[in-house]
Structure formats: C-alpha cells, structure tokens
Image: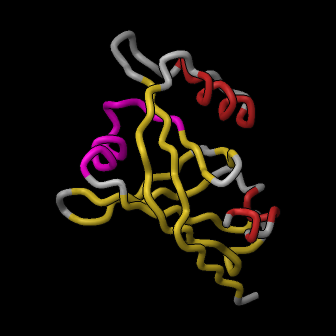
Amino acid sequence: MLNTIDPEILANTIATLATLGAGGPEMTAVWYAVEGDRIVISATARRKKTKNLAVDGRSSILIFHPQSVDYYVEIRGTAELIEDADYAIADRIAVRYGADFRTFDGPNDRRLIISFTPQRVLVTDVR
C-alpha cells in the first residue's frame, strides 16, 4: 500500500502522527522510516504517543510533500509497539537525521518501535 505513495512525499523527513488519547486525538511531529509495507517510528515508553498506542493502536500519519503544502498523504491504520532494546530500528531511523537516540534517552528509558501498518491511504493534491 505504501508503494502507491509518491516517493517525493515519503522523502519528507517529518511526519505528523495522530493517536487517540483520553481527551480525543493527539498529534505529534515524528521522525520515521519506511520499511517494506510499514512505517516505523522510534519512541520511548514514557511518551504520550506510546502510552496512547498501548491502549488503542488506531492512528494516522500525515506527510506533506517537501515542496508543497497543497500535496499530502494521510495514512490511516494501526500501530503496534515492539521493544527495541538494542536500538536496531532507532539506529536505522537516526541515520536519516544524523542523530543518535541514545543521547536523547535517560538511563531508565525504554526504547520502542512504533510499527505502523497502513489500512487506507488518502492523497490530497490541490496544486
């Protein structure tokens, strides 16, 4: 399903992840990578987005084309939380951003993979 999305949109390095919290939808900007038919995001267990997804995996991701706010994709689906104690996915994502997640984490942080599986892709192009 992700192969139907314009690769230029997926070249944007920032996406918006929407999760469902107790008070309704909550959105946050995230770094991500595309791995086959899923989108992966690295986050710590203490983050609100991971707490929300632990309760309800329904979520969506919004990615704008890097050169046009009039062209974007909303991907609706479900997310699963997977342990990433060895930073395997975190390291792959960090390379894209020239970062090291280990420098962001405290000694008691647990690194998780948000493994997002698309169920519906909605493209908006009003350029």
Comparing 2 with 90, the one in front is 2
User: In the displayed structure, would residue 22 be above or below residue 123?
Assistant: above
Residue 83, position in %: x, y?
A: 44, 27
Q: State the count of labels.
A: 0
Tell me which residue sits at (40%, 58%) in the image: 27
Tell me which residue sits at (42%, 45%) in the image: 80
Residue 107, position in %: x, y?
A: 38, 10
Tell me which residue sits at (46%, 35%) in the image: 43
Does 110 appear in magenta? no
Comparing 66 with 7, the one in front is 7
User: In the displayed structure, would residue 30 be above or below residue 20?
Assistant: above
Q: Residue furthest left?
A: 22
Q: Which residues are magenta?
A: 42-55
Image quarter in which the N terminus is found: bottom right
Does 50 appear in magenta? yes
User: In the displayed structure, would residue 115 be above or below residue 3?
Assistant: above
